Image: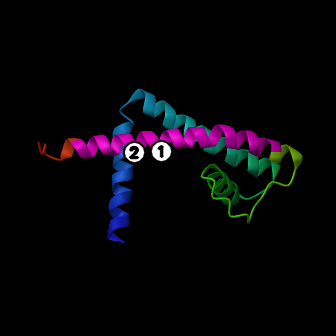
Amino acid sequence: MIAFVTVLGRFFRAIWSGLKDPAFRALAIMVGVVVTSGTVFYRQVEDWSWIDSFYFTIITLTTVGYGDLSPTTAGSKIFTVAYLIVGIGLLLTFVERVAAHAMESNRLTKPDES
């Protein structure tokens, strides 16, 4: 449990430090817009609850796909395909940038061992 809390703390510190970079900030905003738009879309079209819509959005973008929820209309299926193509790349880029900021902050906090 302690390791999980430590990793989670590092993750949020990396995001916080990354927000100082305008390009990272723009990427974070785009991820927020994509997650929000997916949640609103599924809420409106599939008539799911806000929690189910958000849950499906995150499960879809992370490619977990438990299968407990799935689009039922042709329009939402087409949206989901396009959403995956755009969203997965965007989310992977965001995670890569968070990892880069975490490694950079880790490098800055450790003394040089050369």
**Mark 1, secondary structure of its residue:** helix
| Farthest-out residue, left | 114
Q: Of helix, strand and loop, which mostly describes the magenta segment? A: helix
Q: Mark 2: give few (<14), some (14-19) or many (20+) Cα within 10 Å.
A: some
User: Based on the displayed image, in which of its 4 quarters is residue 41 positioned?
Assistant: top right
> Residue sitting at 13 percent across and 45 percent down?
111
Taking the image as shown, residue 85 lies to the left or right of residue 111, namely: right
Question: In this figure, which residue is indicated by the disc labeled 2?
Answer: 99
Q: Report x, y in % for residue 100.
A: 37, 40
Q: Is residue 46 above or below residue 29?
A: below
User: Based on the displayed image, in which of its 4 quarters is residue 51 positioned?
Assistant: bottom right
Magenta residues, start to end:
78-107
Residue 82 colored in magenta in the image: yes
In the depicted view, which residue is nearer to us: 39 or 101? 101
Taking the image as shown, residue 46 lies to the left or right of residue 90, namely: right
| Farthest-out residue, right | 74
Q: Is residue 54 above or below residue 111?
A: below
> Residue sitting at 63 percent across and 58 percent down?
64
Q: Report x, y in % for residue 14.
A: 35, 45
